[in-house]
Image (cartoon, helix red, strand yellow):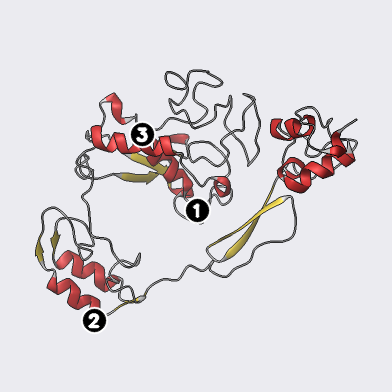
Amino acid sequence: MDISWDSERYLNIYTNTGGGAFGYVPDLPSSGIAGQPSDRVVVDWRVFGEGGEYGWPLDLGHVLVHEVGHYLGLYHTFAGGCEDDCTASGDLICDTEPHQLPTRECLDQEECDTIDPVSNFMNYSWEICMNRFTPEQVRRMRCTLEQWRPDLGRPSQPCSSLCPGDFDGNGIVDGEDLGGLFISWGEYSGLLPCADLNMDGSISGADFGLMMLAWGPCPVDPCIGVDCDDGDECTVDYCVAGNCVHAQIEECGGVCGSKSAGNCDEVNETPGCNDAECCTEICMIDPYCCLVVWDIVCRNKALSGDYPGCND
């Protein structure tokens, strides 16, 4: 039985066990799937939304962001490994650095002698580290909307509040907003008003029902004003649903000048380097080198001749 909404006009998102994956799409839109009943995004319900059952590092809803990236035509950043021609291989995006393997945790692994795109939504990093698409990824997604999904959604008026039903943006859904809904009552074509809460092209009893469900003060982010910094340089600290999470970086903990660390002029997976003076000087301006991994950037600084502490 087909339970999808019109796949040409709506992004259908399903939550189930994900078929053994955290999430997936059946195929990229250019394959011809766009607009078909099977055109959808599937996300394991245990990682869905903020504070999903699986917990950190899958607790910020970024699995959905990642899968919608596929839905809009993006490959993984690690597709194709260290291929040289970014226009014909890899993820076909020239402003994402190539890397051989998915990034784990928040660690830059440097397999292709370039900085891995740890913060990119199309990688496999911890969700706390994912925060960006590149300009060319955005361009590809816009192109996908224009070429493969031209009827997806409809433009709507800029609304003053992210709280559904709060049309005047005063932080509460009340009688003034209800009056705005009644003034907008009826069918619409083209630009949708903010009062069309279910975005079906008309202001009707369905929108009135949604407004009643939202009646009263708008929800407040429980993480506003919460400081989760525990002072530990080897944890990534952040807030979820008002609670602090302290994610331990497994490979962190190396001390500048540690005998167990690799040499400062070589790329190695152990934070810090065994030349204390050089290591300390570089890590004062680039703490990543000593807290996460001594990567190619750290090595190049050590060999640059710009740091007296690194000169023999």
Mark 3 touches mark 2? (CB < 8 Å)? no
Image position of 301 with respect to 162: above or below: above
Tell which circle, 1 or 2, labels the residue nearer the N-terminal end: 1
Which three-letter amino acid code belongs to the residue tagged 1? Gly
- Residue 140, label in figure: 3
Q: Secondary structure at mark 2?
A: helix
Q: Nearer the viewer, residue 240 or 274?
A: 274
Identified at 29% across, 44% down, the residue is: 12
Tell which circle, 3 or 1, labels the residue nearer the N-terminal end: 1
Residue 254 visible in rendering: no
Residue 81 visible in rendering: yes
Q: In what quadrant of the picture does the N terminus appear?
A: top left
The image position of residue 98, as x and y in percent, is 55, 26
The image position of residue 38, as x and y in percent, is 27, 34
The image position of residue 63, as x and y in percent, is 46, 44
Which three-letter amino acid code belongs to the residue tagged 3? Arg
Image position of 214 with respect to 3: above or below: below
Q: Circle 1 is placed at which residue position?
A: 52
Mark 1 touches mark 2? (CB < 8 Å)? no
Identified at 22% across, 52% down, the residue is: 155
Left or right side of 116 for 153? left
Q: In what quadrant of the picture does the C terminus appear?
A: top right
Q: Circle 2 is placed at which residue position?
A: 175
Q: Nearer the viewer, residue 264 or 201?
A: 264
